[in-house]
Amino acid sequence: MKNGHYTTYLKDKNFLFFSILLLSYGIFLSIFSVADFPTSMKAGFMPYLSDKPVGEDGFYMLDVAWNIAKNKGISYSGFPTTGIQPLATFIYSFFAWININFLGENKWLFIRHIIFFGTITHIIFSYLMGYICTFLYKKDNKNKKLVFRIASTLTIFSFGLYRISTYGLETGLYLIGLAYFLLFLLNNLSKRKKLDRFKILTIGLISGLLILIRIDFLIILGFTILILNTKKLLSFNQSSQIFFISLIISSPWFFYVKHITNKFIPSSGGAQSKLINFENISFRSTIFIKSLISHFSILIKDGREFLFFCSLIIFVFILLINFYNNNVHKQTQKILSNDIFISFSYSIVFLSFIYFSTSSATHFYYRYISPISILVIPIISINLMSILNKKTYIYFFSIFLFILQAYGSLHMGKVGNGHSVTAGYIQSNFQSTRDHIGAFQSGVIGYFNNNVINLDGKLNHNALKALLRNKDKKDNYKFSDFIEEQKINVIVDWEGYIKNSLSDLIINNKNWAECEFKIKNSQSICLRKISN
């Protein structure tokens, strides 16, 4: 079997069996998760659809996708928005369109479809990772199928990557695109083949679509092309053509963003951007290192301290076998000697440190740097191939860890997103046309309630402008002025968020008071305007 045929291992019995196993779980999760809102931070064996696996920011994208399907344009809360990744949103809008036109306009059912779709994307990514490893394994051609099996199995049962794929954002599609981009380069540049026009066009097309899936691919593309030029695998002319084609494909989105916000950067980027400084470097470094080590363990998700400790043990183990086992060390060196792989690796690492230095959304570091898994999986898979005599241990251990984490994360009866409680609270108490709800974290709240205005700026560029003016000591503008301008008369969110930007509504303000009924998530408060 030749590596150039991307369907070579599709009929592999091991891959098919494990894919069916995961697909069965994805179907189980999508069908039997509860279509309701929790009334406290407790749940049953099956999670609430409003809580997980689709996450808080995932609901932002699903809400915009729903609006696109309803012919409301790229909008949120009735206003144009730029705070989404366009291609994934439009793909989701196709499922929303089917739901609206043929399945009774059921938003709960839409979430079920997204969970199922996320499971499919995770399986596709697993296949691509297995295939990439066959390109990088140089020792023995007859063992390429075994390398494929190990790598695809590790990826399929990576619970952290599975949660990312079913979160409702673009990351699952992004990982597929990145893996295919690397695979195409490995197949067409590794033997220093001359690229014809069709292949240049194909790389440009893949790159343009990847930018539309997530705009940070511009950095990966630019950095990878630069290194490939220095290694003389791409000429300047070829690189220019690839970059030009990708920009032609992706530029309409940037012009749209410029038209709406007068900037080329979407509002979601600006809302979570803050340069690293002496005050936050320690905290950011801790989260970043933990996220990095979690990806190096592959099978263990980030989160609690004991999970990080398990990841650290695996990370140290990989380092030790590379240091003390000469055969393993040689295999790793062969992988890292591949000019295509190393060029791509440098770009991924570079992007990861850009997020570390510019993003204040530390809770998303694990997701932001998830492309690192594309670099780690081949190394770990080929390392394990070299040291384990019985490869079945890998399969059983992978499945065992997935089951443990799936139970702990999704089936232990604990609500993870307190805003799912708030979403039900709003639906029960504030459905009058006179109620205008403001929420900084408005993902699930806004998805299920049409009268919600986003306040943290991710989906609302006007709110972002108001927040920046509020922070400007030279500007007398207060964020409470924005609340008045938008005619918001109810605010729900974590108390810390409200105190940070709207302290003047809490302290000695007779026009605002806490709502009569409390939000039972131990985090959020509700403020209501009681007079003009």
Image: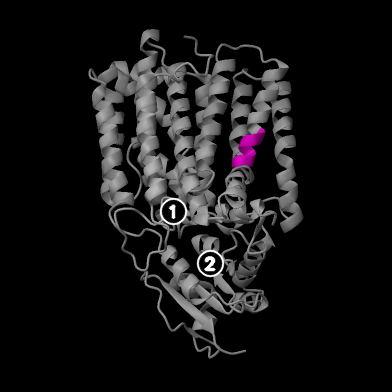
Callout 1 secondary element: helix
Image quadrant of residue 431? bottom right
- Identify the main secondary structure in magenta: helix
Foreground of the two, 463 or 106? 106
Q: Residues within 10 Å of mark 1 (few under 14, many from 20)?
A: few
Q: Which residues are magenta?
A: 208-216
Residue 40 lies, with reference to residue 225, above or below; the image says: below
Residue position marked by numbered label 1 in the rendering? 363
Residue position marked by numbered label 2 in the rendering? 440
Q: Is 209 within the magenta?
A: yes
Q: Is residue 292 visible?
A: no
Judge from the rendering whether residue 87 lies leftward or rightward of residue 300; answer left or right. right
Foreground of the two, 506 or 114? 114
Callout 2 secondary element: loop
How many labels sit on residues?
2
Q: Quadrant of the C terminus?
A: bottom right
What coloring was used for the rendering? one colour
Badge 1 amino acid = His
Foreground of the two, 142 or 97? 97
- Which residue is found at the position 63% from the left and 67% from the top? 463
